[in-house]
Image (cartoon, rainbow, N blue to C red):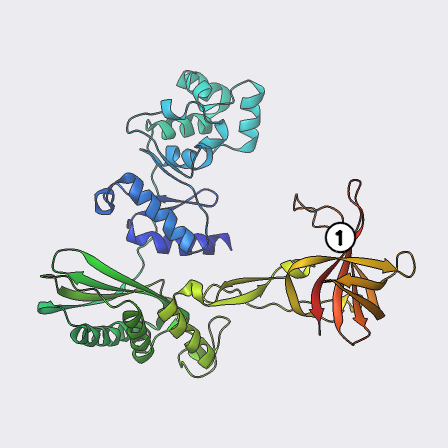
Amino acid sequence: MLAERLARLAHACWRFTPRIALAPGDSLFLDVSGSIGLFGGERRLLREVLAELEERGEAGRICLADTPGAAWAGTRAASGPVSILPPGSGLEAMSAWPVEALRLDAEDCGLLRELGLDTIGALGGIAPESLQARFGAGTALRLKQAAGQAPEPLDYLPPPREFKARLDFESPVVLRQPIAAAVAELTVRLCDQLTAAGMGSRRFELRLHRSDGKRVAYGLRTARLIQPAPQLAELLDEKLQAGAPGRERGVGYDAVSLVARDAEDVMAEQADWLSGASAGNLKGDFARLVDRLCSRLGADAVRVPTPEDSYLPERRWRFVSALDSAAPEHRFEAPHEAMRAPLLLLEQAEPVEAAAAAAGGPPAWIRWRRKRLSLRRAQGPRRVLAEWWRSEERGGREYWLVEDEQGRSLCLYRKQPTADEASRWYVQALAA
């Protein structure tokens, strides 16, 4: 699973550099020595790399250094998510960092700490010959590699196959019609490449190249793998209508290019858009609708509920982008937990006054929203323990499904008392 994630992230980073290698643990080495000037400087490049990871739902840390060892150490020990070590700084910039940042075994790190050598600076103060004799060649080698005193060859990943098409105009154009015609032609060329390779893509980028050297880019993400040209052309047309290229006096567009990112193998059942088969969770015409809405409104504007691992009703679901939703899983509930699901969950549980007919039983009546409601039926209790991994959670809950004399059903819970808080009743939802 980790290897697949790193492979996908490496694929996403090819636009920054063609020299990418897997690093120990959950990391990647990117050789950006020839890319810094193309992205407007070191810090801007690093931020764009992090933005690319965040777009894929991955939080990361990044460090720019002279050597792979120093960069790896910076991602573990530097104070912020983005760090840059001065060129030629050697071990001086890393002197206060722990020895674990040198990619040493846990056993070796434990031995060094027992001897009071808990930082890279303390380790660097020992003569190399003495260091190797006392702690082994591996420890001495890692220290030299971090300082740039020993080579560290990297096994770079093979470059991915690129799928892209470009169309140049004879003279700069400013009208939308020739741009739309060029996009339609590019979709045919690009999708022919994908079909010939038996691949499809969910991420595309349309680029309009201006005559002043600037570029306007439109990103497109879809719910399914796309291979046929008509569907891609339709979505790109939606994207252009939603954000039509602006016109500036004396500035036109010299060329249009289209790129498919993260191409994947297409299974036989995925090839037909209307077959009802799906590479992900969304199928058939519904997937097509989601793609059109996302291309016009943006991916964050189209959201779907996904289940969460919680027994608390307000945390059982959360909304995520329809393009990022995980595969649905069957959720089993034991018979004693199978109370009727809430029909309408209140935005926030509302406290009520309540009086129980018997200790530990359901309330006989409640006062809610300035009205006194007599209760004639109750189902429960269903007890839910506090989620101990959340620091703000204290005490558990006891849920009851009740019905008043008018036949309205409510979902109530009693918060279990703690040392500094009395037991209280709450209405959380209207029940079906």
Q: Residue at x 43, y 56 (%)?
A: 56
Residue 31 appears in the picture as rendered: no
The residue located at (53%, 64%) in the rendering is 326
Residue in view at x 38 percent, y 74 percent = 292
Element on which disc 1 rests: loop
Count of numbered tags: 1
Residue 70: in sight, yes or no?
A: yes
Q: Quadrant of residue 261?
A: bottom left
Q: Give the amino acid type for the residue marked by disc 1 in the picture.
A: Leu
Quickly name the residue at label 1.
Answer: 385
| Disc 1: CA contacts within 10 A as few (<14), some (14-19) or many (>=20) | some
Percent across and percent down for residue 258 are 25, 66
User: Which residue reaches farthest bottom?
Assistant: 275
Q: Is residue 286 above or below residue 152?
A: below
- Viewer-proximal residue, 280 or 55? 55
- Quadrant of image for the C terminus: bottom right
Residue 393 vertical placement versus 195 (above, below) = above
Placement of 105 over or under 386, stated as above or below:
above
218 lies above or below 287: above
Image location (x, y in percent) of residue 274: 42, 83
Q: Position of residue 315 (x, y in %)?
A: 63, 58
State which quadrant residue 194 falls in.
Answer: bottom left
Residue 191 located left or right of residue 107: left
Viewer-nearest residue: 281 or 397: 397
Q: Residue at x 40, y 80 (%)?
A: 273
